[in-house]
Amino acid sequence: MSDFAATGLNDQLVKAVTELGFESPTPIQAKAIPILLSSERDLVALAQTGTGKTAAFGLPALHKIDTKSRDTQVIILCPTRELAIQITKDLESYAKYSRDIKIMAAYGGTSIQPQLAALRSGVHILVGTPGRTRDLLKRKKLRLDAIKQVILDEADEMLTMGFKEELDAILSQTPDDKQTLLFSATISKEVSRISKQYMTDAEEISVARVNAGASTVEHWYYYVMARDKYETLKRIADVNPTIYGIVFCRTRRETQDIAARLQSDGYNADVLNGELSQAQRDEVMNRFRKRHIQILVATDVAARGLDVTDLTHVINYNLPDDPEVYVHRSGRTGRAGKSGISIAIIHSREKGKMRDAERKAGIRFERKNVPSGREICQVQLMKVIDRIQEVEVNDTEIGPFLPDIYAKLEDMDREELIRRFVSTEFNRFLEYYKKARDLNGNEDSRGGRERGGRNERRSERGRDRRASNSSNRNQSERNISNDSEKPFRPTRTSIKNAKFAKVVISLGSSQQMHPARLIGIINHTLDSSDATIGRINIQDKVSYFEIEKEYADKLIEGLRTQVVDGSKIMADVSEGAPMPAKKSKGRKSKPFNPNRPDNFQKRKKTRHRKGGGSKKRG
């Protein structure tokens, strides 16, 4: 018998969670469920992501629903659309045998009409983001007079994301005799204010600060020069051919830059940040869940509530300022008893953040050496051999061709044949890494200061800019694979002799189009990454790009059947399309640069005059 039966939950709920594989309550569930089933007191619960919070508040809420009434009795507020969808799915799985309970997710970025229709037919539990929930209240479509329970999940995140006004507006319209539950990873000043203003005689419970998956997570760090972070990230991917993980960056612009560079270098990567529309986020997450994307480059806000449980790696391209955020990040791997690795790529100025995370989260980082070219080549070579061993041979189809093949290769012995066959698959990797340098930084006794001081750091920034520009010039050299079985490999595809067709599509920067997304759409449409893509020119309403002529017709036909952001894509061959953008007067045109700001200020020309200072010219 499941240990959940002893908590007092009804038989339908116990049967459902048992079938889901829940055997014993987690610490937060063991503390919260008995209290919520036996008491109407408000509750403040401190618990991290991955500790089982949804079941802790969701199971008692389902247990108490009066199915004879069509009124909304429970409202659950959370910070992001993804988390609202995840909570709704979890509650629906718990209520599998409680069929009369109606649960709805309310969130923005999509049509409100289906949500209004669901409310008219009756919803017992509404799981919503603060913005859309307040919108439903303003439209007078959501009534809160029958609310028995208000649950604030990830309360600290909602306030960090600026939902203070919405929360106050929603909570002020709820009945005074309701039960309020507040679940949060931390108790900030604003969280304390809400608890004091809207809660009465609240009981407080907490569980260990480090999430439940932490015991199965290894914490590593690579110490490198700041300029070598991106190269280190690539080597981590190369030495882990089956990697399935999230790379966390600090800003939206950085996520776009890193994702574009990874894609340009032939990695199975895409971006997730707040600039994407909900339709774009859905597209990216659907591909990520299916493992058509192996590396997702994201900001913390965009990654909240992602329902992905099998991540092998979490990579911190930048360590967060708040150690609690690092705990949230690392908790996304090592779930459900599986092992996971959380990696920090740091330089000297981030050592303090790492030590702070160690101290406050009770973890220990282990330093690892950045993989050498030889190590990577060995791993990738063995991956090639594994693929050869696992390939299925169709003797019926290949049989008629074998006599000619045997005759062609009869002059080669076994060893020579193996060498040539493996080299066909492996030469590109060998060429790329044959002169790979050591990226490991020196941590000296003075706190790990990178040697060279200010002048070397200036030099590093200059090299970073040159490296970024070089990467942008090579945007056309893309070879993106959506096949999760293919190993990562940096490609250097030559396009000098390629014959291109110019294509124009009805998506531009005003629809949040950027090179990374455009390439993803092309690969998805062709169901292949074999086509070489040339120059790209993204304008306000349209985008121009070059693609090998043999793929152009198939691509255009496929694009015309697709719908993006509610509109069909218009695509056609473009004759004489501007490629790249038009020249400015008196200057040579420059290659498209995805990192260049859309609106930049040109420096005003100045001329020096005798006696110092400068004078603006005309």
Image (tube, helix red, strand yellow):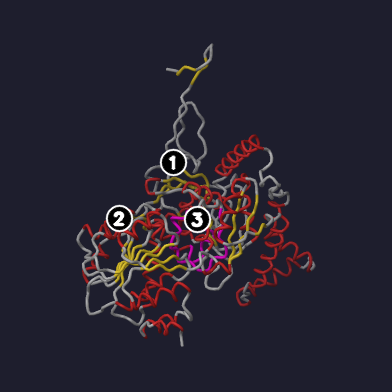
- Please identify, in this view, whether the residue under mark 1 or under mark 2 is nearer the observer: 2
Of label 3 and label 1, which has the lower sequence position?
3
Give the residue at the far bottom of this rendering.
1
Which class describes the residues within 10 Å of circle 2: few (<14), some (14-19), or many (20+)? some
Q: Quadrant of residue 414?
A: bottom right
| Residue 11 horizontal/vertical position (percent) | 37, 86
Give the residue at the far front of this rendering.
201
| Tag 3–tag 1 contact (CB < 8 Å) | no
Q: Which residue is mark 3?
A: 270
| Residue 589 horizontal/vertical position (percent) | 50, 34
| Residue 431 horizontal/vertical position (percent) | 70, 52
Q: Residue 14's mark?
A: none
Which of 190 and 18 lies nearest the eye of the viewer? 190
Q: Which residues are magenta?
A: 288-316
Q: Which residue is mark 2?
A: 166
The amino acid marked with disc number 3 is Asp
Q: Is residue 190 above or below residue 104?
A: above
Label 3 sits on a secondary structure element that is strand
Horizontal relation, residue 288 to residue 154: left or right = right
Q: Is residue 404 above or below residue 168?
A: below
Which of 146 and 596 lies nearest the eye of the viewer? 146
Residue 525 within the magenta-colored segment of the rendering: no
Q: Which residue is mark 1?
A: 577
Taking the spot 52% from the left edge, 13% from the top edge, the residue there is 609
Q: Quadrant of residue 71?
A: bottom left
